[in-house]
């Protein structure tokens, strides 16, 4: 391995061909923030509008006159931008390459023409099932092309899709259906993950038995594994039967730029998950612009993002960004380590992938397997690597760059959030010098700043809370059904600024180094989980009096889940109860939320007013009892001593 250096430039070969060096593409950051109307007006021309916008931005972050609107008099259809407009020049180009979970099963290629036909057929079927503009549709599917087809079919008729990640349990599906008021659920019999079947339809059946889900009239079921499932007539309909006689053309709905495109739930520091709402025009402009800029997209690229479509990364950088750009996107149903730790690299060779975008947790897990599984493959097709979802530690960055990319491919460490719709801070390959572990600099038009706890802006090399001073087209517009919560969550902590919830350091070159969440959200393997959700699952157990959950540093997952549980009087701790509690959390939230360490706590550290002091619990979980800080406000200091003594040893 080469010696670590602080600054790494893209190779001369990469730079010579980089889009950012082509005439007419070069951008001027200073100009983009000086005259955002001119900048974003020009960028919006990349999209096909039925009616071009004349008003570019209408934004005010002040709570008493709050508004975020982009391209507000423009009209368009997102599916037309992802499909129809490519038919003439790219009709026979692969839009989606599908690599199944089982390496022995055959891969599939879907051209833009075929994708257009399949989306239109499904869109017609949805219309026939009574779905129209503004109706919400839940999508709970495996990582198969049909997931993209379902999203685009909704977009075609103006329905608002709400994708639920396949790793969520019935209760979480039910909560999301109830909050969004979905009329229809699209699911599959089962999905595949690492050779195991995931019971998607059975989960939907269980979810629809739970309260709040009565809005659902139809469940459309994709036959995928052929596994045995219950079909409840007349509610449940087979996808293949519903589309059978539908025409391969479908009149797209004419949508205003500010009409909702989708809702996606994400965890916050308090209460239930929030329905992040993205609208049509600004989101599409932003997803497509950033996808081309950050990934240096070329016409013949084979682009692979390993995220699931159930997350924002899948929405923006598997479906909307790449397809709006006419790219070839690979979709993979499997997992990185099955049948063995070489799978990612084998898929890259098999499909000659040129751009590869994954998460630090996957990189760390594969790095642990050593270099041999990587070196057994060629990876010569690769030219660019990307990272997303959590901070990437410099060691993993180096391994990704040196071993996976053979020191040939720039690495783009992309910082963004469900709320931001697209990437905000990232290197532009061929332009921005990279530093392992830093997301580097803001993209054009993006204005980050660091503030202290009082909201005072900090200048120069410093550390603070990451805020955004102004809007960008891909910004979320509201929390579905609760606009006040949107304003309170993001714009009240530091008035007039969007607060990201992240802490961040800025170095002497102005580079941003995201340090992680500063709120009660933990990032487990790049999945956002609110500690409040975990706690409410734990206290649902009849033997539990109180629970507090914090994150702790985890070698592979980035953060692990550490739970402190106080039992009711007369209840005794046991390993059996620990297992029960873990099962309860998985049942309430889903397999993505398992507890790594559970410590029985005779009491929790509280202030005299009864507030749990999480800062102290975090330090105990991190095994840093010497950094507990000020404990003078504790109601009962002996609680802390006993917790430190009894701490579980993660690892
Ligand atoms: O803490 C940041 C972290 O992930 C959070 C957003 O999570 P989510 O909405 O699920 O979206 C993930 C995919 C965009 C952020 O608040 N995060 C995301 N990307 C990075 C990151 N932290 C450091 N570096 C990144 N590149």
Image: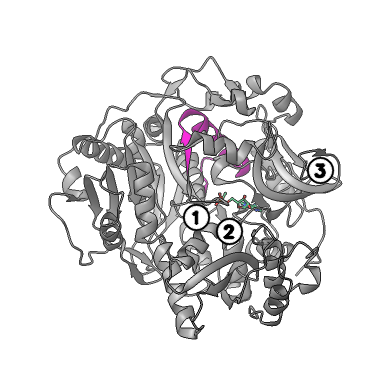
The residues colored magenta run 275-302
Q: Nearer the viewer, residue 201 or 308?
A: 201
On whether residue 557 falls in the magenta region, the answer is no
Per the rendering, the mark at residue 21 is none
- Near mark 1 (Cα within 10 A), the count class, few <14, some 14-19 or many ≥20, is many
Quadrant location of residue 562? bottom right
Q: Secondary structure at mark 3?
A: loop
Relative horizontal placement of residue 358, taking residue 590 as reference (left or right): right
Find out if the beta carbon at label 1 lies less than 8 Å from the nearest ligand 1 atom: yes
Q: Which residue is mark 3?
A: 510
Q: Nearer the viewer, residue 620 or 299?
A: 620
x and y percentages locating residue 571 in the rendered image = 48, 81
Relative horizontal placement of residue 631, taking residue 108 as reference (left or right): right
Q: Are marks 2 and 1 in contact (CB under 8 Å)?
A: yes
Q: Which residue is mark 2?
A: 359
Disc 2 versus disc 1: distance between alpha carbons?
A: 8 Å
- Near mark 2 (Cα within 10 A), the count class, few <14, some 14-19 or many ≥20, is many
Above or below residue 24? Residue 474 is: below
Above or below residue 451? Residue 470 is: above
On whether residue 289 falls in the magenta region, the answer is yes
């Amino acid at each position: 391995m080469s010696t670590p250096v602080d600054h790494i430039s893209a190779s001369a070969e990469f730079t010579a061909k980089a889009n950012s060096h082509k005439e007419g593409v070069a951008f001027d950051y200073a100009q983009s923030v000086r005259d955002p109307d001119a900048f974003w007006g020009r960028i919006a021309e990349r999209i096909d509008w039925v009616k071009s916008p004349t008003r570019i931005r209408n934004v005010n972050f002040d709570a008493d006159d709050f508004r975020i609107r982009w391209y507000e008099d423009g009209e368009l259809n997102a599916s037309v931008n992802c499909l129809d407009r490519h038919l003439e020049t790219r009709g026979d180009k692969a839009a989606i390459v599908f690599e199944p979970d089982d390496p022995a099963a055959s891969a599939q290629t879907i051209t833009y023409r075929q994708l257009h036909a399949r989306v239109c057929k499904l869109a017609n079927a949805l219309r026939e099932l009574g779905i129209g503009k503004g109706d919400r549709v839940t999508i709970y599917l495996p990582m198969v092309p049909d997931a993209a087809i379902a999203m685009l079919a909704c977009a075609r008729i103006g329905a608002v899709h709400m994708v639920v990640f396949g790793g969520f349990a019935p209760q979480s599906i039910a909560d999301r259906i109830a909050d969004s008021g979905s009329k229809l659920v699209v699911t599959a019999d089962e999905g595949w993950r690492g050779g195991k079947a995931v019971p998607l339809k059975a989960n939907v059946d269980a979810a629809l038995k739970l309260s709040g889900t009565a809005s659902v009239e139809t469940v459309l079921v994709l036959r995928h594994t052929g596994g045995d499932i219950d079909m409840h007539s007349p509610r449940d309909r087979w996808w293949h039967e519903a589309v059978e006689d539908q025409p391969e053309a479908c009149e797209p709905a004419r949508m205003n730029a500010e009409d909702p495109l989708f809702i996606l739930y994400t965890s916050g520091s308090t209460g239930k998950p929030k329905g992040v709402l993205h609208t049509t025009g600004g989101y599409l402009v932003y997803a497509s612009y950033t996808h081309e800029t950050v990934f240096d997209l070329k016409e013949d690229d084979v682009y692979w993002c390993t995220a699931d479509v159930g997350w924002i990364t899948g929405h923006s950088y598997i479906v909307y960004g790449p397809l709006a750009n006419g790219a070839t996107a690979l979709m993979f149903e499997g997992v990185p380590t099955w049948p063995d730790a070489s799978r990612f690299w084998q898929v890259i060779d098999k499909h000659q992938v040129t751009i590869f975008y994954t998460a630090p947790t996957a990189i760390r897990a594969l790095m642990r397997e050593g270099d041999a599984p990587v070196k057994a493959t060629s990876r010569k097709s690769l030219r660019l690597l990307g990272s997303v979802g959590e901070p990437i530690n410099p060691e993993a960055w180096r391994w990704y760059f040196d071993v996976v990319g053979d020191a040939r491919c720039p690495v783009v460490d992309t910082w963004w959030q469900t709320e931001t719709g697209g990437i905000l801070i990232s290197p532009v390959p061929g332009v921005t010098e990279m530093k392992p572990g830093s997301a580097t600099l803001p993209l054009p038009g993006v204005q980050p700043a660091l503030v202290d706890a009082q909201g005072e802006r900090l200048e120069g090399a410093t550390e603070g809370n990451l805020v955004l001073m102004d809007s960008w087209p891909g910004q979320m517009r509201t929390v579905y059904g609760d606009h006040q919560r949107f304003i309170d969550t993001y714009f009240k902590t530091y008035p007039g600024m969007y607060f990201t919830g992240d802490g961040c350091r800025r170095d002497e070159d102005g580079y941003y180094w995201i340090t992680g969440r500063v709120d009660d959200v933990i990032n487990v393997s790049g999945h956002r989980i609110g500690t409040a959700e975990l706690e409410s699952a734990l206290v649902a157990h009849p033997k539990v009096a109180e629970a507090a959950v914090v994150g702790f540093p985890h070698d592979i997952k980035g953060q692990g889940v550490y739970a402190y549980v106080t039992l009711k009087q007369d209840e005794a701790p046991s390993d059996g109860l620990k297992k029960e509690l873990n099962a309860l959390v998985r049942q309430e939230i889903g397999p993505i939320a398992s507890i790594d360490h559970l410590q029985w706590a005779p009491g929790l550290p509280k202030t005299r007013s009864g507030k749990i002091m999480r800062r102290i619990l975090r330090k105990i979980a991190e095994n840093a009892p010497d950094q507990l800080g000020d404990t003078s406000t504790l109601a009962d200091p002996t609680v802390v001593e006993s917790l430190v003594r009894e701490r579980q040893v993660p690892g």
